[in-house]
Image: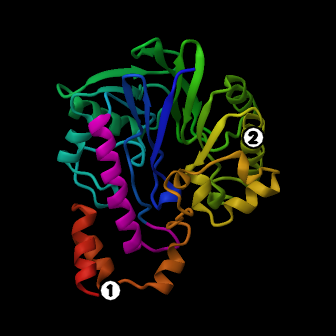
């Protein structure tokens, strides 16, 4: 059986929005979704200084991973899943960071012409223009296979981003010697479709990395019934694959709600069926966005903090962090 090393890099359990992941198999090293971001507003508040510190740390881990990777996979064009070629405080990005992340790599990316939203199409166009001459690009629309070394390959699979209003996402099935080694499926939000859930279970990978339902949007952007459907399917996937020995990492939207663990227990999902990214570091989950309001109450930032964020919106997090520390 082929040895695989999976290194979680950044997600909500580590204080940021992301699903960045590094996978080493044979002579190949694949960086999945090399993006990270913070929610500009949650509970009516901008990111707390501790979130900026988590963002800076996450970006450093992603850059270190990028220095090892020969393949970079991009599932879609939300800014927590790829690195833009621009300065942005809440993405910890810059043209230099873009270059270090993608230059000289084999970039596998979602074809934006396949059921993608208008904003994502525009971002993808900018992304591909910036990559021109710097990286080898393979666009996938679902069903294609990218050959790696030593009888391994990456097969692209297309899923809806939740209910589908946000377009499609490209999932990656890593196959070695006809074995399904890993399935990376970001932003599927459950999924809401029972047939998609059954498809995931049938693939039966050794390792599954999957984004969960957006509980924090229930009754707002996402109906209560949709959340129920997503949780039912999510629980089915975790239980059925967990019982057969699949290593399941749950991530992303579900961890933006403080009640995520209670919600899973209500659907009969026991903690030993799944892992979090934070488990890799021997840490309790640091759900900084979910507890942003409490962070402001118990550790209020300097009075001019919001003005600092406005002034340094096109800077890197470390600059704001240094200024905040200097005022305390």
Query: On screen, 291 above or below 64?
Result: below
User: How many labels were placed on the picture?
Assistant: 2
Query: On screen, 324 above or below 99?
Result: below
Reading the image, the residue beneath label 1 is 302
Nearest the eye: 302 or 58: 58
Q: Is disc 2 placed on a helix, strand or loop?
A: helix
Q: Where are the magenta residues, as a range?
A: 41-68
Q: Position of residue 72 (x, y in %)?
A: 36, 31
How is this picture coloured? rainbow
Nearest the eye: 78 or 284: 284
Residue 107 picture quarter: top left
Residue at left offset 56%, top offset 35%: 185
Residue at left offset 29%, top offset 87%: 328
Reading the image, the residue beneath label 2 is 233
Res. 30 in view: yes
Q: Position of residue 27 (x, y in %)?
A: 36, 22
Residue 189 picture quarter: top right
Query: On screen, 22 above or below 133?
Result: below
Q: Position of residue 206 (x, y in %)?
A: 62, 29
Relative placement, left or right, of 109 versus 198 is: left
Res. 219 in view: no
| Mark 2–mark 1 CB contact (< 8 Å) | no
- Mark on residue 110? none
């Amino acid at each position: 059986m082929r040895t695989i090393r999976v290194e979680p890099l950044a997600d909500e359990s580590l204080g940021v929005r992301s699903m960045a992941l590094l996978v080493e198999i044979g002579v190949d090293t694949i960086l999945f979704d090399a993006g990270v971001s913070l929610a500009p507003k949650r509970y009516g508040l901008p990111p707390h200084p501790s979130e900026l510190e988590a963002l800076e740390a996450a970006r450093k881990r992603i850059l270190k991973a990028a220095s090892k990777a020969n393949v970079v996979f991009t599932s879609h064009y939300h800014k927590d899943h790829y690195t833009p070629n621009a300065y942005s405080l809440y993405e910890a990005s810059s043209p230099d960071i873009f270059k270090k992340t993608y230059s000289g790599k084999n970039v596998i990316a979602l074809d934006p012409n396949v059921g993608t939203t208008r904003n994502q199409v525009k971002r993808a166009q900018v992304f591909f223009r910036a990559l021109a001459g710097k990286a080898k690009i393979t666009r996938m629309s679902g069903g294609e296979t990218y050959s790696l070394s030593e009888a391994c390959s990456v097969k692209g699979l297309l899923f809806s981003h939740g209910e589908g209003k946000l377009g499609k996402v490209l999932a990656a099935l890593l196959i070695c010697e006809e074995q399904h080694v890993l399935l990376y499926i970001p932003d599927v939000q459950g999924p809401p479709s029972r047939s998609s859930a059954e498809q995931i279970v049938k693939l039966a990978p050794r390792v599954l990395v999957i984004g969960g339902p957006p509980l924090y949007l229930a009754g707002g952007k996402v109906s209560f019934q949709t959340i129920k459907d997503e949780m039912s399917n999510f629980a089915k996937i975790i239980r059925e694959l967990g019982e057969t020995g699949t290593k399941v990492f749950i991530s992303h939207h579900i961890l933006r709600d403080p009640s995520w663990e209670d919600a899973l227990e209500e659907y009969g999902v026991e903690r030993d069926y799944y892992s979090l990214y934070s488990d890799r570091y021997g840490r309790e989950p640091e759900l900084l966005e979910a507890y942003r309001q409490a962070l402001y109450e118990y550790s209020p930032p300097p009075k001019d903090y919001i003005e600092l964020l406005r002034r340094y919106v096109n800077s890197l997090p470390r600059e704001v962090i240094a200024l905040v520390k200097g005022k305390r």
